[in-house]
């Protein structure tokens, strides 16, 4: 835990204190930021407040009085609910504005961990509860140099695996001997998975291989029993993600599309160009903001991409956010590129990673073009290979 850095961030944001609270592991963010064991036996409420100035303080139940002993600061204990409220009021007396894992109207649900009743009690104490969303981004989403390097390790491996995966589809569907093999979406998922294991990568679920209309289901998961065969003339989408098999490494996550044994149709080419233009508009918005040293929030990058798709007449077919934060978790705790599912006002911070992945999903095929970006204090850059046309398989 970085007490000095947290206190400096609180002063910068003019917040009196950051109040952490948990019961039965409802708030995993607290455990990660405070460095508490994720598997601790917690059956009673605990509170930990870090002020912008001064010493942190704790409030714990008597039968679990050691739960926060690894953290600095003085400790109070309670047994009854009356004693809890009295102790909490006294502990927070010096502070008016408190950051918590709370989001007004649940607008950013990724950080909305505190129950309404706890917020009600604190407001009865005269406290102003504000969201810790930007603080969480600062202490959860910012990558170390080692994590950034690990992203590029995963990128080099996955870019190569994806290219070879498309070739493997071609080898099976259109072999040199003229005798096509039966191959399904799931078969290629297995091939990609084995290639990633050989490259010492780990991942969650997936990867995803989708044919024709299945590519319009942005969370399609092929199974051994239910996946479709891949034939000559089909449209194929591959979404693949992974990170190096070491603690703390950063994911790489991309999506490409292509056609088997033919040239794309005019409609496919048209949709791809629209999606590519939306992707590039979001990339440019972030790049320009960082070059000019101007703040940019996740919703602004989403708007840049979504405007391109709406102007082309496909707005109703772009059914998800433009991108998500990436870290040691595939969907990290930083700003998402989103003004559809949420109005994400979190700033895109230096030394963070995120996807840019607009899509258009029609009845017979869907196109998503996904790349990743990494920011520094001065610039924002796309990582890895960037798809410029539909793959000819």
Image (cartoon, rainbow, N blue to C red):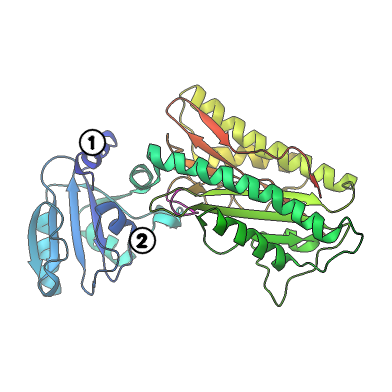
- Sooner in the amino-acid sequence: mark 1 or mark 2: 1
Give the side of residue 227 with respect to residue 124, left or right: right
Percent coordinates x, y for residue 37 in the rendering: 26, 62
Give the side of residue 151 with respect to residue 173, left or right: left
How many numbered discs? 2
Question: How crowded is the residue under tag 2: few (<14 C-alpha within 10 Å), some, or many (20+)?
Answer: many
* Corner quadrant of residue 64: bottom left
**In terms of secondary structure, where does tag 2 sit?**
loop
Percent coordinates x, y for residue 31 in the rendering: 28, 59
**In terms of secondary structure, where does tag 1 sit?**
helix
- CA–CA distance between discs 1 and 2? 24 Å
Q: Is residue 214 above or below residue 280?
A: below
Q: Nearer the viewer, residue 154 or 129?
A: 154
Q: Is residue 153 above or below residue 290?
A: below
**Residue 380 seen:** yes
Residue in the picture at 19% in, 48% down = 50
The verdict on residue 194 being magenta is no
Residue in the picture at 86% in, 57% down = 175
Magenta segment main secondary structure:
loop
**Closer to the camera: disc 1 or disc 2?**
1
In this view, which residue lies farthest toward the front?
Answer: 177
Give the side of residue 262 with respect to residue 373, left or right: right
- Region of the chain picked out in magenta, as a range: 327-333
Percent coordinates x, y for residue 308 in the rendering: 71, 38
Q: Which residue is mark 2?
A: 113
Q: Nearer the viewer, residue 22 or 1?
A: 1
Percent coordinates x, y for residue 339 in the rendering: 56, 46
Give the side of residue 164 with respect to residue 232, left or right: left
**Residue 123 seen:** no
* Corner quadrant of residue 301: top right
Q: Which residue is mark 1?
A: 8
Q: Which mark is residue 162?
A: none
């Amino acid at each position: 835990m970085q007490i000095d850095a947290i206190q400096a961030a609180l002063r910068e944001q003019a917040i009196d204190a950051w109040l952490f609270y948990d019961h039965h592991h409802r708030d995993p963010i607290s455990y990660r930021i405070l460095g508490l064991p994720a598997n601790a036996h917690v059956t009673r409420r605990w509170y930990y407040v870090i002020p912008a100035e001064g010493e942190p303080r704790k409030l714990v139940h008597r039968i679990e009085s050691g739960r926060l002993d690894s953290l600095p600061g003085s400790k109070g204990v309670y047994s009854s609910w009356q004693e809890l409220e009295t102790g909490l009021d006294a502990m927070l007396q010096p502070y008016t504005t408190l950051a918590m894992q709370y989001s007004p109207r649940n607008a950013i649900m990724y950080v909305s961990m505190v129950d309404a009743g706890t917020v009600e009690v604190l407001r009865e104490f005269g406290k102003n509860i504000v969201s810790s969303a930007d603080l969480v981004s600062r202490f959860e989403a910012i990558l170390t140099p080692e994590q950034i390097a690990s992203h590029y390790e995963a990128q080099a491996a996955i870019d190569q695996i994806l290219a070879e995966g498309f070739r493997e589809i071609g080898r099976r569907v259109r072999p040199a001997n003229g005798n096509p093999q039966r191959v399904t979406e799931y078969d290629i998922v297995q091939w990609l998975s084995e290639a990633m294991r050989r490259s010492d990568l780990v991942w969650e679920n997936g990867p995803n291989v989708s044919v024709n209309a299945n590519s319009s289901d942005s969370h399609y998961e092929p199974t051994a029993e239910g996946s479709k065969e891949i034939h000559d003339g089909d449209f194929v989408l591959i979404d693949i993600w992974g990170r190096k098999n070491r603690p703390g490494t950063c994911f790489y996550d991309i999506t490409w599309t292509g056609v088997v044994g033919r040239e794309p149709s005019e409609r496919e080419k048209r949709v791809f160009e629209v999606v590519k233009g939306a992707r590039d508009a979001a990339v440019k918005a972030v790049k320009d903001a960082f070059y000019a040293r101007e703040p940019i929030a996740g919703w602004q990058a989403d708007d840049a991409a979504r405007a391109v798709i709406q102007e082309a007449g496909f707005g109703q077919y772009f059914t998800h956010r433009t991108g998500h934060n990436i870290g040691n978790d595939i969907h990290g705790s930083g700003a998402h590129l989103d003004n559809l599912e949420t109005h994400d006002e979190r700033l895109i911070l230096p030394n963070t990673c995120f996807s840019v992945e607009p899509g258009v999903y029609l009845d017979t095929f869907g196109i998503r073009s996904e790349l990743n970006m990494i920011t520094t204090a001065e610039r924002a850059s796309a990582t890895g290979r960037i798809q410029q046309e539909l793959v000819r398989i």
